[in-house]
Image (cartoon, grey):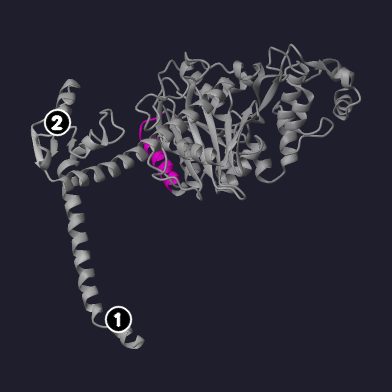
């Protein structure tokens, strides 16, 4: 009997169940179509339901079941409650509130219920979007606040390291210090907001890829409706996004500040150059043709030195020459120059291609002098040399360890040897570093630390004269924000090479070349230039040894 019952249960009734299922699917489809029709009819073009729960129209749920008022004035009323007192009272309330309200359209109770169901889902989606926009706006505010805090301290680089927590570090006068700490979620949102704020960037942020971007100080942040701007003294920000092991994101922001000389002064002395260096730069600017290269690591002040020399050059020539620059990107304004940015490039290959294209365009634009922001590839180097060979003065920067090493760097890039041996082509080789300046109010004499090894090396190198005239960093005071440091200064080495020096370098006889430069050409190495400033009390002993090696050693090239 049990088996028969089971057959009855799973036999004939299956067909009936299938028919019921098909009917249910059909009914559900009709319901979905009806909801889409209602949504298209009443909620199109941003039309809103004003009588939703939580709206400014305060009505009870019983009244809400009978009617619906939209922002465009459409007023729906249940056809079974045309003359209900609650409906009439609502009309009076709406008119008192000076809301747009049309004559009632009578619909079914089911349609009003469907309208509220759709309206509540639409409002929830709007709330989520608004919350996301508020979060993004808050992160953009945080981004501006971090930059403003950094700019107030003249920070050169801001490092944002996102791992288990978020660490924000500032580099001030070459020194790194942790400034702020947040949780991981805040850091990830901050990095995304920084990418979204950029004016020049890839189309999408990719957490696991290396990406570069740029934010201009003169433009509002995206999505901020013009309300959020960078501090007025920040000209631009270069952003570098990096994936890191054992973390999620690593963002480095290089802050480029507006020139401290808004009148466009070509003052080199304010950068730290002495009379000796200023005279050599003057001689290099006076040569109408040939190549001048300024070298140094990232953050050594190459771009600022180059900019000041170009301003000075234009002033000395009474602005009667055509100076064209090719930069990626232009960092500082040069009044009187035509500054050509490299644009429409995302990848390194595209940047090289666009840079080469911009250089070719500059050569065809009747220049007297060209300034190339940086030589990073052989194609750029070849075009730079082409400009110098074709009767133009060319100034550029390069990453190299020292002034003599510029020649080796160019040869490694693939520049032909005969070009590097030509003194009519190679006019100036300059290398520089930024040295921290001592605070004159709290510096201390090395005589107070005679037992330190560095002071003993100083005595071996310079004798009692060095001990009498050298200072070290103090404990800090109110004049230096308790750091012992008062800004930085450029310390260069400058070579005006001749054929003998170039030949010795290209042959690999570096030591002979250096000796020839310092004796026959009256040259001065970076270490000698730094020691001169140390003996004037401008920089300390530790700073000299940090950049130039131990005091009792010869310079190494």
Secondary element under disc 2, as helix, strand or loop, is: helix
| Residue 390 position in % (x across, y down) | 44, 36
Q: Looking at the image, do the residues carrying marks 2 and 1 touch, with CB atoms under 8 Å apart?
A: no
Q: Is residue 357 left or right of residue 494?
A: left
Q: Which residue bears the numbered disc 2?
A: 85
Q: Which mark is residue 417?
A: none
Q: Quadrant of the C terminus?
A: top right
Which quadrant: the N terminus?
bottom left
Which type of secondary structure does the marked residue at label 1 adopt?
helix
Task: Using the image, determine if residue 459 lies above or below residue 34.
Answer: above
Q: Which residue is mark 1?
A: 10
Q: Is residue 509 left or right of residue 153?
A: right
In percent of width and height, residue 535 lies at: 78, 18
Q: Measured along the vertical axis of the image, is residue 502 above or below residue 255?
A: below
The secondary structure that dominates the magenta segment is: helix
> Visible in this render: residue 414?
yes
In depth, the one of 427 and 98 nearer the eye is 98
Determine if the magenta segment contains residue 288: no
- The location of residue 122, given as percent across then percent down, is 28, 42
Q: Which residue shows up at 48% across the image and 27% down it?
A: 144
């Amino acid at each position: 009997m049990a088996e028969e019952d089971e057959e009855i249960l799973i036999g004939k009734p299956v067909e009936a169940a299938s028919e019921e299922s098909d009917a249910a699917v059909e009914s559900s489809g009709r319901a979905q179509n009806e909801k889409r029709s209602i949504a298209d009819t009443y909620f199109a073009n941003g039309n809103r339901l004003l009588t939703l729960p939580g709206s400014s129209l305060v009505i009870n749920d019983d009244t809400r079941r009978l009617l619906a008022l939209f922002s465009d004035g459409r007023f729906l009323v249940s056809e079974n409650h045309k003359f209900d007192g609650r409906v009439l009272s609502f009309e009076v309330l709406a008119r008192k509130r000076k809301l747009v309200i049309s004559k009632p359209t009578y619909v079914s109770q089911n349609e009003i219920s469907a309208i509220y169901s759709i309206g509540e889902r639409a409002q929830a989606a709007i709330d989520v979007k608004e919350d996301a926009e508020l979060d993004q706006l808050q992160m953009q505010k945080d981004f501006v606040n971090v930059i403003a805090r950094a700019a107030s301290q003249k920070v050169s680089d801001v490092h944002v390291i996102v791992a288990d927590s978020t660490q924000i570090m500032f580099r001030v006068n070459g020194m790194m210090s942790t400034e702020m700490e947040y949780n991981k979620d805040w850091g990830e949102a901050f990095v995304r907001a920084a990418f979204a704020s950029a004016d020049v960037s890839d189309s999408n942020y990719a957490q696991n890829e290396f990406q570069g971007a740029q934010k201009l100080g003169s433009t509002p942040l995206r999505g901020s409706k013009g309300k959020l701007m960078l501090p007025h003294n920040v000209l631009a920000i270069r952003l570098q996004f990096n994936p890191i092991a054992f973390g999620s994101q690593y963002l480095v922001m290089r802050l480029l500040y507006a020139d401290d000389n808004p009148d466009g002064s070509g003052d080199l002395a304010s950068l730290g150059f002495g009379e000796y260096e200023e005279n050599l730069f003057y001689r290099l600017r006076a040569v109408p043709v040939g190549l001048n290269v300024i070298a140094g690591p990232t953050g050594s002040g190459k771009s600022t030195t180059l900019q000041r020399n170009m301003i000075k050059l234009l002033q000395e020539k009474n602005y009667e020459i055509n100076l064209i620059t090719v930069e990626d990107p232009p960092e500082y304004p040069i009044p009187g120059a035509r500054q050509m940015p490299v644009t429409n490039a995302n990848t390194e290959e595209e940047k090289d291609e666009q840079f080469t294209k911009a250089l070719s365009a500059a050569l065809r634009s009747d220049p007297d002098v060209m300034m190339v922001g940086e030589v990073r590839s052989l194609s750029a180097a070849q075009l730079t040399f082409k400009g110098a060979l074709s009767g133009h003065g060319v100034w550029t920067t390069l990453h190299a360890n020292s002034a003599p090493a510029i020649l080796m760097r160019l040869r490694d890039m693939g520049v032909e040897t005969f070009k590097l041996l030509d003194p009519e082509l190679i006019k100036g080789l300059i290398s520089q570093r930024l040295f921290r300046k001592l605070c004159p109010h709290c510096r201390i004499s090395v005589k107070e630390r005679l037992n330190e090894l560095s002071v003993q090396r100083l005595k071996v190198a310079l004798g009692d004269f060095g001990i009498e005239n050298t200072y070290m960093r103090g404990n800090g005071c109110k004049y230096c924000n308790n750091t012992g440091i008062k800004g930085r200064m450029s310390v260069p080495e400058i070579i005006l090479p001749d054929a003998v020096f170039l030949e010795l370098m290209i042959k690999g006889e570096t030591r002979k070349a250096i000796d020839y430069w310092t004796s026959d050409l009256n040259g001065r190495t970076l270490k000698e230039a730094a020691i001169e400033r140390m003996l004037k009390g401008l920089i300390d002993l530790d700073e000299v040894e940090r950049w130039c090696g131990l005091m009792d050693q010869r310079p190494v090239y």
